[in-house]
Image: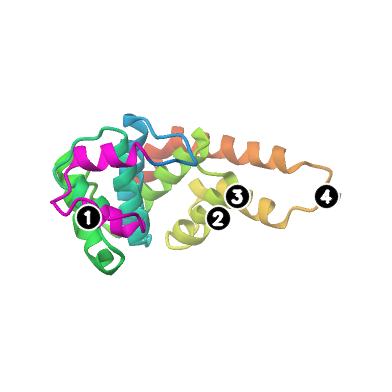
Amino acid sequence: MEKIIRQHGWVEEDHGAATSADVRAFLSQMPTEKTLMTHDDALKQLSHIARERAFGKHVGSDRLIRAGLDALMAQVESPSLAMLAGLLRGEEPEAPALFDQVLEELGLLFNPPADPRTAKWAMASWIAAQIADGTLGPAAGTHIICADIACDLGYPDELQSLVACHFNLEAWEESWGVSVEELNQEAVEAAKQFLIKRPVAEAGS
């Protein structure tokens, strides 16, 4: 457990190899500023990060390591989690490969479609689902739809309502006589409508 202790600047006591049980026992004694994740929440976080990376978003090694720690504390079982969670700052370049190893062990590896356009439609569905269920804010979600997806797809009709929501949220002024909350709700509804119609959209990709 030496790596975990040194990484966080704590006293070094145990120089043996870190195990999942060691890490959980040690960290359970440390004060925490946030509520620990449930097992399902930790798996969702790993899956979410897997998709972010698969769709081309850079995810820093520090976040990958933190996700490993969260998973350990949530009682997720994976042979490589302790190694991921125990990486030192100088070992951070190893995090992506270890993170992928953890995903493989947990059956969470995600490979986007090989065809670039089909992959963009899959990404659009993923982002829209997060807007619809509230895990991603409408402003941030519609920005991704507009800048990273619709542009590359040539602004297809199926994404026009979400693109319009993006511009409305970005340019909103109090003088419009409509609240930001209303615009956010419009974006959520647009995302839900897209998800209903997405088989048609993807078929036309």
The tag on residue 143 is 2
Q: Which amino acid does label 3 sit on?
A: Ala
Left or right: 70 in relation to 190: left
Decide which of 29, 186 is in the foreground and name it.
29
The residue that label 3 is drawn on is 139
Q: Earlier in the sequence, mark 1 or mark 3?
A: 1
Label 2 or label 1, whichever comes before in sequence order: 1
The residue drawn where x is 50% and y is 55% is: 144
Question: Residue 153 sits in which quadrant?
Answer: bottom left
Q: What element carries label 2?
A: helix
Q: Is mark 4 on a helix, strand or loop?
A: helix
Gap in angstroms between the C-alphas marked 3 and 2 = 6 Å
Mark nearer the N terminus (4 vs 1)? 1
The three-letter code of the residue at mark 2 reads His
Structural crowding at the residue carrying mark 4, measured as other residues with C-alpha within 10 Å and reported as few (<14), some (14–19) or many (≥20): few
The reply, left or right, for residue 117 in relation to residue 188 is left
Q: Give the range drawn in magenta.
A: 1-29
State how far apart marks 1 and 3 are (Cα).
43 Å
Please indicate, yes or no, whether residue 23 appears anywhere in the rendered image.
yes
3 and 2 marks in contact (CB < 8 Å): yes
**Residue 122 point in image, percent of width and height:** 35, 47
Q: Is residue 117 visible?
A: no
Q: Distance between the residues labelled 3 and 4?
A: 16 Å
Kindly identify the residue that appears in the image at 36 percent across and 30 percent down: 38
Tell me the tag on residue 174: 4
Nearer the observer, disc 2 or disc 1? Answer: 1
Reading the image, the residue beneath label 1 is 2
